Image (cartoon, helix red, strand yellow):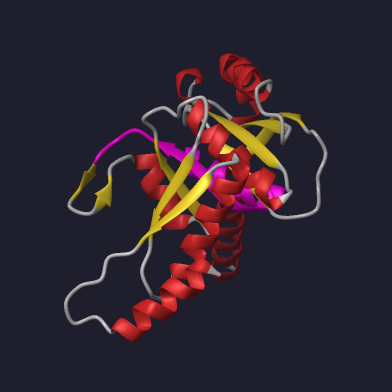
């Protein structure tokens, strides 16, 4: 009898902890608390997370240029981080923190003739998780993240950017933000023959198209490089 009683107690404890673990996981799931959708066009979506109102312009304009060239939607995401001490459900009241960012996005949107921006506010424990979850939800093929830090020992310094680069299951464009001029006249891209050359050139061409700018391709050959391969690459670029 004691054996059966102890067995049922252990089963009960296991069920309790399993339920509790699942409930905590559910409570920590990122949520969307606000969205203003401008309607989907056929194509591949672009998601642009922005952190604060002073750093909206560059990342949003790059995302809008890509969206205009690809005839798709650009969605701007602001994430409100909810501390561990607060249940996610109660974090909905913190959505008002995003209003200055949304207002800055609307200001930028007024100067974008080729694309309308959708806006989303998400809440969650971890900003990078909210970004990746929203990218999947929106069907975004590209995430455009602004970055204002430094590169040290070959790594991008910035916890959110680095985590998005590490965990994203889609393309990520990192924009080093020094502020864009009002008019972009030329996009410069460095490329050489290799596995990623086509992707790099496609991205640069889309930016040039979206900004109504020229495109200049720079390729550097080193001593010992195959001149035939270099010439084929140059011919392909010209075409």
Q: Is residue 201 left or right of residue 88?
A: left
Query: Where is 80 relative to 13, above or below?
Result: above
Relative image position of residue 82 (x, y in whole percent): 52, 28
Query: Where is 9 relative to 77, above or below?
Result: below
Relative image position of residue 194 (x, y in whole percent): 39, 75
Relative image position of residue 163 (x, y in whole percent): 40, 49
Q: Quadrant of the N terminus?
A: bottom right
Residue segment shown in magenta: 124-150
Residue at 20% across / 72% down in the picture? 222
Q: Is residue 126 left or right of residue 138?
A: left
Residue at 22% across / 54% down in the picture? 154
Residue at 43% across / 80% down in the picture? 232
Residue situated in front as seen by the camera: 40 or 194: 194
Q: Which image quadrant for residue 75?
A: top right
Residue at 70% across / 47% down in the picture? 138
Magenta stretch contains residue 135 = yes
Magenta stretch contains residue 108 = no
Q: Quadrant of the C terminus?
A: bottom right
Relative image position of residue 35 (x, y in whole percent): 74, 30
- Please indicate, yes or no, whether residue 184 appears anywhere in the rendered image: yes
- Please indicate, yes or no, whether residue 132 appears anywhere in the rendered image: no
Residue situated in front as seen by the camera: 19 or 180: 180
Number of labelled discs?
0
Query: Where is 39 relative to 155, above or below?
Result: above
Residue situated in front as seen by the camera: 201 or 128: 201
């Amino acid at each position: 009898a004691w054996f059966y009683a102890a067995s049922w107690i252990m089963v009960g404890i296991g069920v309790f902890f399993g339920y509790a673990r699942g409930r905590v996981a559910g409570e920590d799931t990122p949520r969307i608390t606000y969205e203003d959708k401008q309607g989907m066009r056929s194509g591949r979506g672009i998601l642009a997370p922005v952190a604060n109102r002073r750093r909206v312009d560059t990342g949003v304009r790059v995302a809008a240029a890509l969206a205009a060239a690809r005839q798709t939607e650009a969605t701007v995401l602001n994430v409100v981080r909810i501390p561990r001490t607060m249940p996610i459900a109660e974090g909905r009241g913190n959505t008002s923190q995003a209003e200055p960012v949304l207002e800055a996005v609307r200001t930028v949107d007024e100067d974008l003739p080729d694309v309308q921006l959708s806006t989303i506010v998400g809440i969650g424990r971890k900003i990078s998780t909210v970004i990746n979850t929203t990218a999947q939800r929106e069907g975004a093929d590209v995430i455009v993240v602004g970055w204002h830090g430094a590169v040290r020992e070959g790594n991008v310094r910035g916890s959110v950017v680095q985590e998005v680069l590490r965990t994203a299951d889609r393309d990520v464009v990192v924009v080093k933000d020094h502020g864009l001029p009002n008019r972009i006249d030329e996009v410069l891209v460095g490329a050489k023959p290799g596995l990623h050359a086509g992707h790099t050139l496609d991205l640069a061409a889309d930016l040039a198209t979206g900004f109504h700018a020229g495109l200049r391709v720079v390729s550097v050959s080193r001593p010992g490089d195959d001149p035939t391969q270099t010439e084929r690459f140059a011919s392909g670029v010209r075409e």
